[in-house]
Amino acid sequence: MDALTAFGLVAVSAMMICYALEHKHRHYTLGFAAACGLGSIYGFLQGAWPFGVVEVVWMGVALRKWLQQDSELVV
């Protein structure tokens, strides 16, 4: 296994774990967003730019969700 494949495996594994635990704490939503960012980097480095674009979109969706969760806690 080369370094790029290992990086992708870690990124996608982190995505799945954070997504599964989102209901436990809002920080997992932020972790999911970060893992999507890593997945996007992996996609672009691998040459699968559509995957990279989709992961950037998911990162934005997760960041927006995290910000909304944050504002809901303050109110």
Image (cartoon, rainbow, N blue to C red):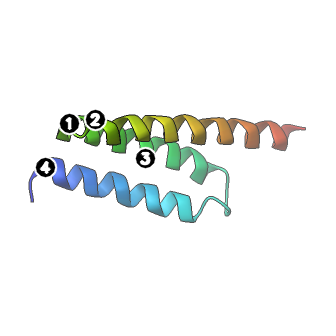
**Residue assigned mark 1:** 45
Q: Residues within 10 Å of mark 3 (few under 14, many from 20)?
A: many
Q: Residue 48 occupies which quadrant of the picture? A: top left
Measured from the top left, where is residue 47 in percent x and y? 19, 37
Q: Do the residues labelled 2 and 4 touch (CB within 8 Å)?
A: no
How far apart are the two marked residues, 2 and 3, measured between alpha carbons? 17 Å
How far apart are the two marked residues, 1 and 4, measured between alpha carbons? 11 Å
Mark 2 against mark 4, which lies toward the viewer?
Answer: 2
Q: Are marks 1 and 4 in contact (CB under 8 Å)?
A: no
User: Which residue in the rendered view is the most extreme toward the left?
Assistant: 2
Q: How crowded is mark 2: few (under 14 residues within 10 Å), some or many (20 or more)?
A: some
**In percent of the image, x 13 and y 49: which residue is there?**
3
**Residue assigned mark 3:** 35
Nearer the observer, 73 or 41: 41
Q: Quadrant of the N terminus?
A: bottom left
- At label 4, the amino acid type is Ala
Q: Label for residue 3?
A: 4
Does residue 23 appear left or right of residue 39 in this picture?
A: right
**In percent of the image, x 35 and y 45: which residue is there?**
39
- At label 2, the amino acid type is Trp
Measured from the top left, where is residue 64 in percent x and y? 65, 35
Q: Is mark 2 on a helix, strand or loop?
A: helix
Q: Is mark 4 on a helix, strand or loop?
A: helix
Measured from the top left, where is residue 6 in percent x and y? 20, 55
